[in-house]
Every structure is written in structure tokens, then in C-alpha cells.
Image: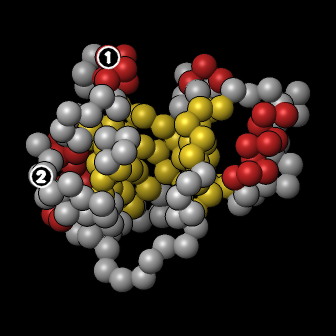
């Protein structure tokens, strides 16, 4: 089986870590390891989570995630991790999500969570059963609006992009 996505550029972008509270992740990933808030972040109200990214001196990034109040988005993940959370997914940016999806399907991969509705972020996932226990997200990033990005404090206060106005626990 060929293991390349022919004609599609693929680049690793970040690792996502989820926990019941982003505030519990900050002492490790920001304070101990020196991550700096990349700016921006906010809520995905449809799916039910809040997210922000930290960057490090070499340009690597970690995304921190938590469920929004009442969300069941992370329920099965937290069940697997006994409520603690941990590495949730690996993100790779692709130059052409449509070509990547066609190529993956042609190679027999089962895809999950295909979402092409937002031109800013078009994505699909390889289920952990397809990737040796790792959830892999492939995303094509589109144009981003100019202007100020939310601060860490604004994101945690529920005032980031699409914020629900409810502070993080």
C-alpha cells in the first residue's frame, strides 16, 4: 500500500492536549515549559469545546482544549483517560483537503468528522483505529481576518473567537 498523499503538501502543525480545564494545563505547558500564547483562540460552540495555542522558541505549537459547560464532546476521551485528559490529536496542514480526502478514501482509510463548511478551516480525521491509537486531524487553513487576536485572559473569560461569555472553570 502506498503511504503518500500524491500531490498534496502535508506539514505537521501542532499537538492538541485536552483536559477538563485549560487552567490545569497552563502550569506545565506555559509556566514550566515556556509556552507563549500565540494569540487568539476561542470556542467551537457547535462541537462544544474551547481552545487556544501556545508556541515555543523553535516554532512548535501545542493546542490546549477543554469542554464547554454541558458539552459531551470529550466524554469518551475522558473516559479512556480516567478523567485526566492527555494528548487528544495530532494536526497536519494539507494544501488541498479535497484531494487528501479522495486520496485517503482511495487507499481504503475510513474518515471521520469531515467538515468542509468553514473556508477558514476545512478538516477531516483519521480515527485512532486507523492510525495505531492516534487521532489524526488533517486541515486546510483558509484566509484569516486581520485585526487583533484575543489575549489568553480573554479566551479564558469566554471572550475569544465565538466566545460564549462563560469563563473557563
Residue farthest toward the bottom in the current orientation of the protein: 147
Spot occupied by residue 18 in the image (x, y as percentages of width and height): 33, 37
34 left or right of 92? left
Mark sitting on residue 30: none
Spot occupied by residue 61 in the image (x, y as percentages of width and height): 44, 56
Q: What is the secondary structure assignment of the residue under circle 2?
A: loop
- Where, by quadrant of the figure, is residue 28 drawn? top left
Q: Nearer the viewer, residue 117 or 5?
A: 117
The structure residue drawn at horizontal position 73% and vertical position 57%, both measured from the top left corner, is 96
Q: Is residue 36 visible?
A: no
Residue wearing tag 2 = 167
51 left or right of 5? left
Q: In this picture, is 152 found above or below 6? A: below
Q: CA distance from mark 1 to mark 2?
A: 24 Å
> In terms of sequence position, does the residue under pointer 1 or pointer 2 come before the other?
1
Spot occupied by residue 134 in the image (x, y as percentages of width and height): 54, 28
Residue wearing tag 1 = 79
The structure residue drawn at horizontal position 31% and vertical position 48%, both measured from the top left corner, is 45
Amino acid at each position: 500500500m502506498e503511504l503518500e498523499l500524491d500531490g498534496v503538501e502535508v506539514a505537521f502543525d501542532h499537538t492538541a492536549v485536552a483536559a477538563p480545564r485549560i487552567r490545569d494545563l497552563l502550569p506545565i505547558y506555559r509556566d514550566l515549559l515556556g509556552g507563549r500564547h500565540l494569540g487568539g483562540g476561542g470556542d467551537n460552540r457547535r462541537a462544544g469545546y474551547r481552545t487556544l495555542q501556545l508556541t515555543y522558541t523553535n516554532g512548535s505549537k501545542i493546542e490546549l482544549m477543554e469542554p464547554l459547560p454541558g458539552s459531551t464532546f470529550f466524554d469518551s476521551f475522558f473516559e479512556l483517560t480516567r478523567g485526566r485528559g492527555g494528548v487528544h490529536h495530532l494536526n497536519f496542514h494539507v494544501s488541498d483537503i479535497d484531494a487528501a480526502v479522495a486520496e485517503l478514501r482511495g487507499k481504503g482509510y475510513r474518515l471521520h468528522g469531515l467538515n468542509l463548511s468553514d473556508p477558514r478551516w476545512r478538516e477531516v480525521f483519521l480515527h485512532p483505529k486507523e492510525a495505531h491509537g492516534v487521532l489524526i486531524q488533517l486541515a486546510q487553513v483558509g484566509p484569516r481576518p486581520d485585526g487583533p487576536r484575543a489575549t489568553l485572559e480573554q479566551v479564558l473569560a469566554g471572550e475569544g473567537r465565538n466566545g460564549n461569555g462563560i469563563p473557563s472553570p
